[in-house]
Amino acid sequence: ILKGSFFALIAAAFTLTSCEADDVCLPEEAPFVTLNFHYPNSETDLEDTIFYKAYVNDTLLIGEGNNTKDLSVLNLPILTTTDLSVKYILEQGTTYNTIQIDGTDTIRTTHTAPKDSLYINYTLDNQYNSKGCGFGIYFKDATFTNSSTWIQSTQIVNTTINDATSTNLIIFAEPRSY
């Protein structure tokens, strides 16, 4: 019995110590489109009380509220589609109503949050991520276009989308005005 316990202990110790750091697939290794927001013609982060909603192909990804990770950086999941294109709708703020009573008149005003469409076209390729993740799909040769409603201009930084930390696009915009 003692001999069997000894071998079981040795096997357990070997199993626990043979796992290396790269044997685990970490979530930050998944590809995301990373957007940085700046004031127009500036390297200053646009982060003052900006609220965003992000939709991809008409499905809400990021709901009401602020982007709690970092107000000047937005990470959007990227999906593989048959046409190798993804449409994001970025909404700067929330739509809300105000009521003003002026004597006997009630004035209701709807403040609509500005929306912009961001289109990303890409090609697919495979890359070796790590021992834990193995091979995975990444997105290369990405192109970015937008509808320029509240986005004033963009600057492409990286056309390869293969992680969650590298900036792909800088968006220049004024802060929301309401």
Image (cartoon, grey):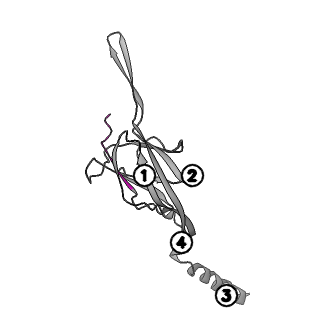
Residue nearest the viewer, comparing 136 with 146: 146
Between the residue at mark 4 and the residue at mark 3, the CA separation in whole angstroms equals 39 Å
Q: What amino acid type is highlighted by mark number 4? A: Tyr
Q: Which badge, 3 or 1, comes first in the chain's sequence? A: 3
Badge nearest the viewer, 3 or 1: 1
- 60 is higher (above) or lower (below) than 24: above
Q: According to the image, label 1 marks what residue?
A: 144
Q: What amino acid type is highlighted by mark number 2? A: Asp
Badge nearest the viewer, 2 or 4: 2
Between the residue at mark 2 and the residue at mark 1, the CA separation in whole angstroms equals 15 Å
Neighbor class of circle 4 (other Cα within 10 Å; few <14, some 14-19, many 20+) is few
Residue at 38% x, 54% y: name it. Answer: 169
Single out the residue that lies furthest toward the top. Answer: 104
Q: According to the image, label 3 marks what residue?
A: 6
- 82 is higher (above) or lower (below) than 3: above
Q: Which badge, 2 or 4, comes first in the chain's sequence? A: 2
Between the residue at mark 3 and the residue at mark 1, the CA separation in whole angstroms equals 61 Å
User: Is 91 part of what is drawn in magenta?
Assistant: no
On-image quarter of the N terminus: bottom right
Q: What amino acid type is highlighted by mark number 3? A: Phe
